[in-house]
Amino acid sequence: MPVALTRGVSRSIGRCELTHLARETIDVGLAVRQHHAYEACLESLGCRILPLPPEPDLPDAVFVEDTAVVLDETAVITRPGAESRRPETGRVAEALKSFRPLSFISDPGTLDGGDVLRIGRELFIGRSARSNPEGIRQMRLQLEPFGYSIREMPVKGCLHLKSAVTLVSEQTVLINADWLDARYFNGLEILEADPGEPYAANALLINGTAVYSQAYPATRRRLEKQGIPLAIVDVSELAKAEGAVTCCSIIFDTNGADP
Ligand code: CIR
């Protein structure tokens, strides 16, 4: 059974890091309710939720995806590109060490999990404002021995690789081709987000269903036309913090371990 590691919304989320969006007031109560509904959605798709308590003084801690990349063989604890986010990794490492041997990205490397998209044994890693060439070099060193091939690509105009591309079925990627060259994904089916919805390329695929934000109706129609099963969630408050559906969980198989 897959586990979804999550962490509650911090009451200080209003002081989150922002790169591309102007700061707007976040309704923390609503953000908490939306986050609970997101967890319930993941549960309905077959995940067991492993919730970490909120970190009141770490505004972005709800976005656990950036703190670790969990593969069958190891969990890589990242070194987030934003300095304010580096203290987020400790509790996540603590939680993951019962499931996987840990590896670490170390100084001067930086890497955010939001920049890593796994498709089978291929890891597509975005070189972004958060993930630097040294961080990606360390990923290569640690993961190529397990048989992963690493494909590095520049990310422009958005925060993370997974703001620009995610998987919506085993063989289909949803992409904003203004932010990322679709040719990196030759060989897969490519579905473009509606040009009027630049943030619409983020979906979270679980057991054949894509968890998807209700904020992008035009792209949603494209997904439905392709016959992609969807589970729609409202993450409006988390989106004000530049968060999307992949960011709020780390999903992995327990491989039989059940601590
Ligand atoms: C940040 O700037 O780090 C947060 N406010 C948003 C992080 C979103 N994470 C993700 O897309 N993986």
Image (cartoon, grey):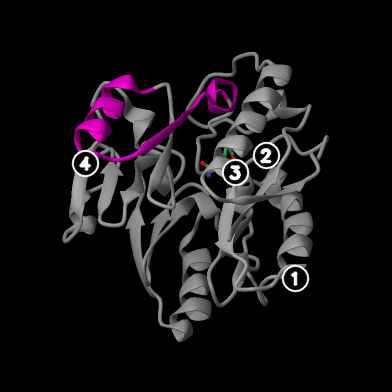
Q: What amino acid is labelled 4 in the image?
A: Leu
Q: Is residue 238 magenta?
A: yes
The magenta region covers 216-240
72 is higher (above) or lower (below) than 236: below
Residue position marked by numbered label 1 in the rendering: 98
Quadrant of residue 171 within the rendered picture: bottom left
SS at mark 4?
strand
125 is higher (above) or lower (below) than 64: below
Q: Are there few (<14), some (14-19), or many (20+) residues within 10 Å of tag 4?
A: many
Q: Are there few (<14), some (14-19), or many (20+) residues within 10 Å of tag 3?
A: some
183 is higher (above) or lower (below) than 148: above
SS at mark 2?
loop
Distance CA(mark 2)–CA(mark 1) = 21 Å
Q: What amino acid is labelled 1 in the image?
A: Ser
SS at mark 3?
helix
Residue position marked by numbered label 3 in the rendering: 43
Q: Is residue 2 magenta?
A: no
* Residue 61 x %, y %: 70, 41
Residue position marked by numbered label 4 in the rendering: 191
Mark earlier in primary sequence (3, 1): 3
Q: What amino acid is labelled 2 in the image?
A: Val
Q: Are marks 3 and 4 in contact (CB under 8 Å)?
A: no
Q: Report the side of 151 relative to 38 (left or right).
A: left
Mark earlier in primary sequence (2, 3): 3
State which quarter of the image contains the N terminus: bottom right
**Which is in the foreground here, disc 3 or disc 4?**
3
Residue 62's label in the rendered image is: 2
Distance CA(mark 1)–CA(mark 4) = 38 Å
Q: Report the side of 28 relative to 177 (left or right).
A: right
* Residue 226 x %, y %: 20, 38
Mark earlier in primary sequence (1, 4): 1
Q: Report the side of 54 relative to 133 (left or right).
A: right
